[in-house]
Amino acid sequence: MEHWMNLLVLVLICLFFSIPDGFADIADIEDPYVDIEQTTAPNGINFVYAPAPSAKTFSIKIRVRAGTLAETEKNAGVAHFLEHYLFTDSRLKNNSSYLDLIKELGGTGNGATSSLETVYYAKVPSGKAELIAKMFGKMLFNRTFEQDRVDQTRKPVLLEIGEPGLMAYLWRTGFLKIVYPDFLKLPDFWQSEFGLEPIKSTSLAAEQSNTLSISAHDLKTFYDEYYHPSNITVYFAGKFNSETMKSIAQKWFASTPARKGKTVEQRATTIRKSPFLRTTSTSGTPRIAVGTKFWDATLEDLIVIDIYVEYLAHRLMKEFRNRKGETYTARGIVNNVKNFGQAVVTLETPAAQYSNNLRYIRNVIHEEAETGNLTEEQFAEAMKLYSTHYNLTDRDSSTALRLAENAERNNKVFGRSGSEFLIFKSLTFQDFTARLTKLFNSNQRYSVLLRPPLVWRYELAIIIVIFTITMLFFAKMKLTVPFEHSKVRLVRKLACPPLHLIEIISLSLGSVLAQYLSFGIRWGFFKSNFIQSSVLLSDYLYILIEMAFIIVSCIIVLKLTVRKLIICGDYLYIKSITYFAKRIPLTEIKSIELLHLWEVVFSMHRLSGLGFGQRFSYYDPLFLRPGLYLRFKDGSSGFFSVKDAATAIDEFKQYLVKDEAKLKIAI
């Protein structure tokens, strides 16, 4: 019995040591790119073939380099509309669409429009590969544009993006451009660091508004300009017969005549060679995103940086989640446009541990990447972890399609038609650390920090309330004119819209004015890394300054809005909606007249001394109601749409006429 127990223990020990660690040896991994083939037809169209003989499905994808960046304000939405339209076709029977046919073949498909491109894709059982490839060729080329079908397509497009609302109407009238012009918009990361155009060059309101009027001619014009063969790439992936598929590609795609046209590309026009830092606070879950920005990267650089941020995120998961329970998930993310972009690790963290965790991550990046102190053991671990990208667990068409897109991108951006895996496999420790120190340095640091409040979760809201009350209190102290209520002799309101409407309009105008006035401050805060390094400056102080501009701007606008004319003692008070009142001695009034608006506007003599704001307050939209025209001894004048002005002038007369020789009153 003891003999059998010893034998069992020996077998278990052997089995334990024979269990793999979950990673295949890199030398034993098959190159997943080895069978990918890229060709360019004489007409300029690009083909990428990614066969996967063991797959059960076939995937096709068409990429057209034409997205929202190809649009202007006049044709906003046309790229997305065209994507929908091309799935319809009057040549199809029973009023079907290509999406219906894809589903009937047992597959799935769709389209998508982004800033740089529009894609059309489908995935079907491998036995339908040839049929779906021909179908996509028919869908893409030799198209006609019929207005009735355009009108029919318009409805589902609007259901997706939403019916035009008030904002779309305001955009159509040009009002939004006045209220919030493009130059007031702060640039995002890509604009500020690399000079790229905004990812979304037109607004949703513009797209909704234009979708109502897009015509067949608009679609055809956009199609002719951007859907030319040299602007198109077709991917075939999964299980298919290579010779047959190449024949289909030649007949249905490459036979289309070559023609010139436009394309959409993004280039780094300016490179800001200093750290990118943005700091704000949140009452929700704090978040850390730190890493590096890079430019002029090679394919080797891109692979190295992707390996490292994925490896770092993996270790942070062990440190912060598994050991401390201080995050939900850590992710390594590389976002690049061609050979420039950002590489970051991002994670959530409790407020109490925010500073410590941020310091820990920055120290790790500094020690390993910036100073090149990554160890050989860490390099080997990072390589083994990243090798799962190439040691594929399946050979489905979706995986083959992803590889095909990677291969085409590497060829287009870096001019490398060879295998990405072979580059990965050839990386050495010395080469890896040398590239890391080039990609990570103090001038290229990237940080976007969503910090917790300084003390209490809702402290910023309380600070804003206290600050607003304080500002209004001081405004009242400074703007209120001494006023003896016991000496009030006459009060006349101006004929104007409802007070609440005036307040809403005035506050809206004040907010718009604040945007213009505070633009320089916002730009300075945005650009200064010193300010962005402190949440107290970048968030709290910034918000209070913005609030100050809004309050001051609203007071300025409300100050110009006259609500009452008051005679108190020996003074005429021109009272605004807010605290402000202009005080004029009655002895300074030279004359008073009852006039219609046109009698003032078309008289150079009367118009010359007229000022705006508190000296011109006329609200009658039909311009029919007469008002009181006051001329002062200093040559200035005022015009006010006082209620029942014909009666009001008599009331003013009894207080103003003390010396007929000094004051002329005309009715």
Image (tube, grey):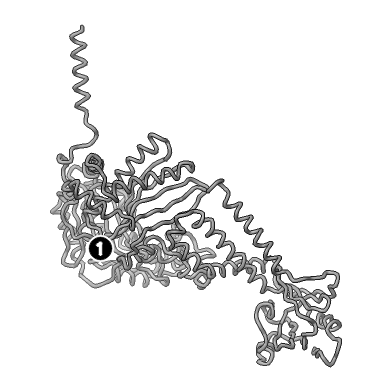
Q: Position of residue 254 (x, y in %)?
A: 18, 64
Q: Which image quarter is the N terminus in?
A: top left
For the question of whether residue 559 can be seen, the reply is: yes
Q: Residue furthest left?
A: 243
Task: Determine whether 20 is above or below 194 in the image.
Answer: above
Task: Determine whether 590 is above or below 261 in the image.
Answer: below
Q: Residue at x 65, y 80 (%)?
A: 612
Q: Is residue 231 left or right of residue 331?
A: left
- The one of 290 and 55 positioned closer to us in this rendering: 290
Q: How many marks?
A: 1
Crowding near the residue tagged with mark 1, few <14, some 14–19, many ≥20 C-alpha atoms within 10 Å: many
Q: Secondary structure at mark 1?
A: strand
Residue for badge 1? 232
- The one of 434 and 80 positioned closer to us in this rendering: 434
Q: Which image quarter is the C terminus in?
A: bottom right
Residue type beneath disc 1: Ile
Q: Residue at x 25, y 65 (%)?
A: 231
Q: Is residue 566 left or right of residue 28?
A: right
Q: Is residue 101 left or right of residue 558?
A: left
Q: Position of residue 426 (x, y in %)?
A: 16, 48
Q: Position of residue 248 (x, y in %)?
A: 18, 58
The answer to which quarter of the image holds residue 411 is bottom left
The answer to which quarter of the image holds residue 91 is bottom left
Q: Position of residue 324 (x, y in %)?
A: 41, 35
Q: Is residue 380 left or right of residue 77?
A: left
The answer to which quarter of the image holds residue 590 is bottom right
For the question of whether residue 81 can be seen, the reply is: no
Q: Residue at x 82, y 91 (%)?
A: 662
Task: Determine whether 623 is above or below 245 in the image.
Answer: below
